[in-house]
Image: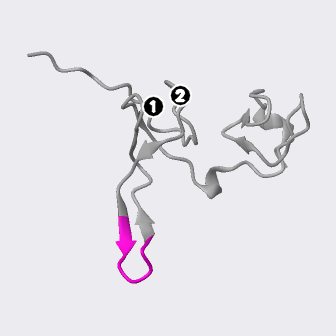
């Protein structure tokens, strides 16, 4: 019997899997029975639904505000130093106060 080890990318919040690029995750949530909506999440651990890698899912607080991409100028889609528009890596020193 072999035990496969899943890739472990936990520690840096991300909106996509660093292993395969998928944005579909399995997460633990608590549902409000009356509203039929999730009211709490376990944001420490998630699993990529495509490749099974362990990740730390991103939250709105992980978003880097006012971080314009040096290549395309996008400032609304920068999370963790990566531009969603053109995949350019943004240097944190470019947007520090």
Mark 1 vs 2: CB contact within 8 A: yes
Calculate the distance from the C-alpha at mark 1 to the C-alpha at mark 2. 7 Å
Instruction: Examine the image and state in which quarter residue 84 appears.
Output: top right
Please say whether residue 27 is one of the residues in the magenta stretch: no
- SS at badge 1: loop
Q: Label 1: which residue?
A: 9
Residue 76: give x, y in percent of width and height: 80, 49
Q: Position of residue 3 (x, y in %)?
A: 17, 20
Residue 77, image x and y in percent?
76, 44
In the rendered image, residue 15, in percent from the top left (x then y), is placed at: 58, 42
Mark count: 2
Residue at the farthest top position: 2
Say whether disc 1 or disc 2 marks the residue closer to the N-terminus.
1
Q: Nearer the viewer, residue 8 or 84?
A: 84
In the rendered structure, find residue 18 and report the number of the disc placed on it.
2
Residue 91 to residue 37: above or below: above
Q: Residues within 10 Å of mark 1 (few under 14, many from 20)?
A: some
Q: Which residues are magenta?
A: 30-37
Seen in the image, is 83 located left or right of residue 62? right
Q: Residue at x 47, y 39 (%)?
A: 11
> Which quarter of the figure is the N terminus placed in?
top left
Q: What secondary structure is marked by label 2?
A: loop
Looking at the image, residue 4 lies above or below residue 35: above
Q: Residue at x 56, y 37 (%)?
A: 16
Q: Residue at horizontal 73%, vertical 48%?
A: 64
Q: Nearer the viewer, residue 20 or 66?
A: 20
Q: Is residue 4 above or below residue 82?
A: above
* Residue at 44% in and 54% down: 43
């Amino acid at each position: 019997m072999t035990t496969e080890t899943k890739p472990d990318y936990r520690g840096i919040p991300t909106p996509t899997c660093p292993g395969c690029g998928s944005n579909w995750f399995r997460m633990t949530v608590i549902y409000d029975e009356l509203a039929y909506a999730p009211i709490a999440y376990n944001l420490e651990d998630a699993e990529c639904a495509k490749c099974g890698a362990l990740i730390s899912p991103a939250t709105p607080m992980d978003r880097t505000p006012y971080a314009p991409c040096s290549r395309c100028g996008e400032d609304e889609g920068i999370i963790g130093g990566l531009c969603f528009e053109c995949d350019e890596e943004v240097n944190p020193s470019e947007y520090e106060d």
